[in-house]
Every structure is written in C-alpha cells, then in structure tokens.
Image: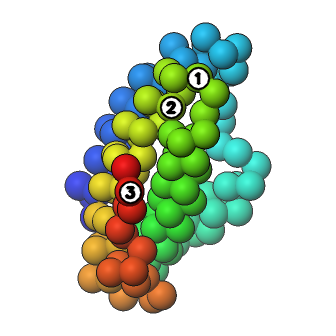
Amino acid sequence: MKQFGQKMVDDHSKMNEQMKPIASELGVAPPDSIPPAEKPLETKLKGLSGDAFDKAYMQAMVKDHRQDRMEFRKEASTGKSSAVKEAASQGQQVISEHLKMAEDIAKKHGAGGMNASMNSNPGPQ
C-alpha cells in the first residue's frame, strides 16, 4: 500500500511538471490546493487509520482514476491543441496503469464494489 501511495506521488508530480509548460502556453494556472469538492474525502481519510483507511483510500483511488482516465481519453481525442492531445494521451497511459494497480489492491483489501476485469481495460488508444 505504501509503495502504491509513493508511486502516486512520484508519477503525478512528474505528470504535473510535464503539464506546466502546456498550461502556461494556454494561459491556465495549475491549482495550488485541493479542490473544494475533494475536501470531504480529505477530512474522511484524516479520521481513519489501518484497514479502514486502506479500504477508503483505495476506493477513492479507483473512482478518481476511472474519472481521470475518461477525461484524459476525451481530451486526447478532442483537444484543440496538439500539445494538449499528446500530453493527455501520455497521461491516459499512466492513469490506466494506476487504475489497474488500484483495482488490484482494492480487490485484495476487500474494498467492495471493485470489478477489475470490467473496468481496467483502457480501450482503444
């Protein structure tokens, strides 16, 4: 579980650094804090420990990566900028890898409702 968490930090930090020049080119400022919609999850996770934390965290990781993959996939195919489309395509690959890992870990931890076989297929790339 700790290795997964560290991989999320490392990979997402790397992706953020790769996206900064593109965001700057487009005049978009990257967020500097947790979005308000994520605050309830942050509060929930801060109040948990042990197995309860692991399950809640992995459920959140699966849900978040499914949503991210969908958004990156859409941007990779419909983005107006070739730089954005390329970055989204690369990001989609990383996110698909994370999703597969998250689903596998969630399944091992009994983080209910995770159907890895149906949901980890990244589809056409």
Indicate the quadrant containing the N terminus: top left, top right, bottom left or bottom right: bottom left
Q: Secondary structure at mark 3?
A: loop
Looking at the rendered image, the disc whose residue lies closer to the viewer, 2 or 3, is 3
**The furthest residue to the left:** 3
- Identified by mark 3, the residue type is Pro
Q: Residue at x 45, y 88 (%)?
A: 112
Q: Position of residue 103 (x, y in %)?
A: 35, 73
Q: Residue at x 46, y 68 (%)?
A: 62
Q: Earlier in the sequence, mark 2 or mark 3?
A: 2
Q: Secondary structure at mark 2?
A: helix
Q: Residues within 10 Å of mark 3 (few under 14, many from 20)?
A: few
**Residue, disc 1:** 81
Q: Position of residue 37 (x, y in %)?
A: 74, 55
Q: Position of residue 68 (x, y in %)?
A: 53, 53
- Identified by mark 1, the residue type is Ser
Q: Residue at x 54, y 18 (%)?
A: 22
30 or 46: which is nearer to us?
A: 30
| Picture quadrant of residue 90 | top left
Q: Are marks 2 and 3 in contact (CB under 8 Å)?
A: no
**Residue, disc 2:** 85
Q: Is residue 7 left or right of residue 31?
A: left
Q: Secondary structure at mark 1?
A: loop
Q: Position of residue 105 (x, y in %)?
A: 29, 73
Q: Are marks 3 and 1 in contact (CB under 8 Å)?
A: no
Q: Is residue 24 above or below residue 70?
A: above
**Residue, disc 3:** 124
Q: Is residue 3 left or right of residue 112?
A: left
88 or 9: which is nearer to us?
A: 88
**CA separation in Å, label 2 and label 3:** 15 Å
